Image: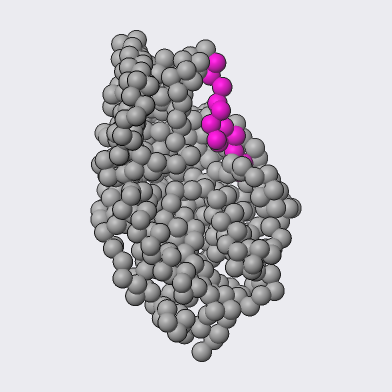
Amino acid sequence: MKQVETLIVGAGVTGLAAAGQLGIQDYLVIEADTTIGGYCKTIERSGFVWDYSGHFFHFRNPSVDRWLRERMRPEVVVSTVRKKAFVAYGGRMLDYPFQKSIHQLPREEFLECLHDLYFAERQTAQEPSREPRRTLREMLEARYGRGICEKFLFPYNEKVYACNLDELDPGAMGRFFPAPSLADIIRHFRDARDDSYNATFSYPSSGAIAYVDALASAVRPDSLSMEEGLVSVDRTRRVAMTTRREIGFGRMISTLPLPLLAALSGLEHDPGAFSWSKVLVFNFGFDAKGPRDVHWVYFPSPDVSFYRVGFYDNILGTDRMSLYVEVAMSRTAVPERERLRSRVLSDLRAAGVVSGQRLVAEHSVMLDPAYVHISKRAEAERERVRALLEEQSIYSAGRYGAWRYCSIEDNIVEAWELVRRLRGGAGTA
C-alpha cells in the first residue's frame, strides 16, 4: 500500500493551490478526470475558446494576481476589461444591476419600483429592533419592495437557484449580491458609474485554463495521478481506497463536494441538509459577430430557458460570435439535452442575440453541483461534518468542499491558508 504524508483529492483550483504550497513535502494529488482544472477547464474548438462556464477574474488581493501572472506562459496575454453587463427586460436592455437602473424602465414601472423602494427603506428604518429577516425572499422584499423584487430579484434568483427563495438564508449570495441603498440608487440616476466588486475583470487570451496552468506550475508533475478517483475512506486507519489502489495518508485535503466526502468516509450526516442547483452550459460558436459592446446579459423572464448569456468574442476581441449560455435546474432534473439545446437556440433568436449567423461549433457540459443552497440547516451541518473530519486529519476545502458561494481567488487563498495552518504558520504565499 502506498503511503503519503498529504493526500489531495481533486486537481482543480483548490487542490492545485494546496499542492503548490507543499513544496518538497511528501504529497500526492489524485484526480478522477483525464485533465486538471475541475470546473475551470477551457475548450478550444474550431478556433473558439470556451470555458466550462463564464470564469472572469477580479482579484481583491494584487499579490495573488501577480503570483499567477508571473507563472503564465509568455504567449498568454491577460486583458483587463471594464465590464459591460445588462438585464434583458420587457424588450429592452437595462444596465446591470437592475435595482440601480429602475430609471431606465417605462415611466409607470419606474414609479412603481421607486414608490415600493422608498417605503420599504422607510419601514426598515422605523423598525430597527424588528426580528432579522429569516429568508432570502424576506430580505430582498424588505430591502427593495415588491416592484424591484417581482420584476427581477425574485424571478432571476429563482431561475439560478432552481428553488423557492424562502429555502435560502438572507446571506445566501454573500458579498456577490449588489446591495445599493436608496441613496445609491437615486445617485445612479445621474451618475451611472459602476462601483461593483467586478467593475473590471481580467481574462487570459487562452481562457481560464491559463490560471490553472499557473497553479500547476508549482506542483511536481510526478505527484499528479490522473484518472484516479476516490472510492471510500477508512477514517480510523487513514486509508483511502481509490479506483486503482489503497493509499495510506497522514492527512487528507479533499475538494470533493462535502456531502459526497461525508458519504465516502462513512460519516453519519444529514444528507437532506445539503441541496443545490445544477447548470447546463452550452458554448456556441457562430460564423459572424452578433451584439457588440456587451460582455454578458441576465435574463430574468421565466419564459426564457437560460438565465445568462456571455460573449467571449467581445472580451477577447475576436471576429466571430462566441457565446456561453447557462441553464439552471434542480439537482433532480433529468433534461433532454437535445430538446433543451433546440429551445436555447430558439430563445437566442427570439432575444435578438442570434439574427442570421450560422452555428459552426459547439460544446456543452453539465455542472453538478453548481450553486449550493445556503441555509441555516446546511451551515450547521457543514460545520459539524467538517469538524468531525478534521478530528481525523481530513480537511474539506474549496467551493464545494466548504459548501459556500465564493470566487476562484477565494479558493486559492483558502488553500494557501490551510497549508500554512497545517505547517504551523510557515509558508511563502
Give me the residue at 73% from left, 53% from top. Answer: 70
Specify whether 79 is left or right of 163: right
Give me the residue at 29% from left, 62% from top. Answer: 271
Please tell me whether residue 387 is drawn above or below residue 371 in the rendered image.
below
Please tell me whether residue 412 is drawn above or below residue 156 in the rendered image.
below
Foreground residue, 66 or 204?
66
Residue 304 is a magenta residue:
no
- Where residue 131 appears, x then y in whole percent? 31, 34
- Where residue 140 appears, x then y in whole percent? 34, 31
Give me the residue at 36% from left, 63% from top. Answer: 259
Specify whether 253 is left or right of 134: right
Q: State the predominant SS element of the stretch in magenta.
A: loop
Please tell me whether residue 272 is drawn above or below residue 230 in the rendered image.
above
Image quadrant of residue 147?
A: top left
Does any portion of residue 23 appear in the rendered image? Answer: yes
> Going by the picture, which residue comes out furthest to the top?
107
- Where residue 101 appears, x then y in whole percent? 44, 20
Total labels drawn: 0
Foreground residue, 55 or 246?
246
Residue 194 is a magenta residue:
yes
Range drawn in magenta? 191-203
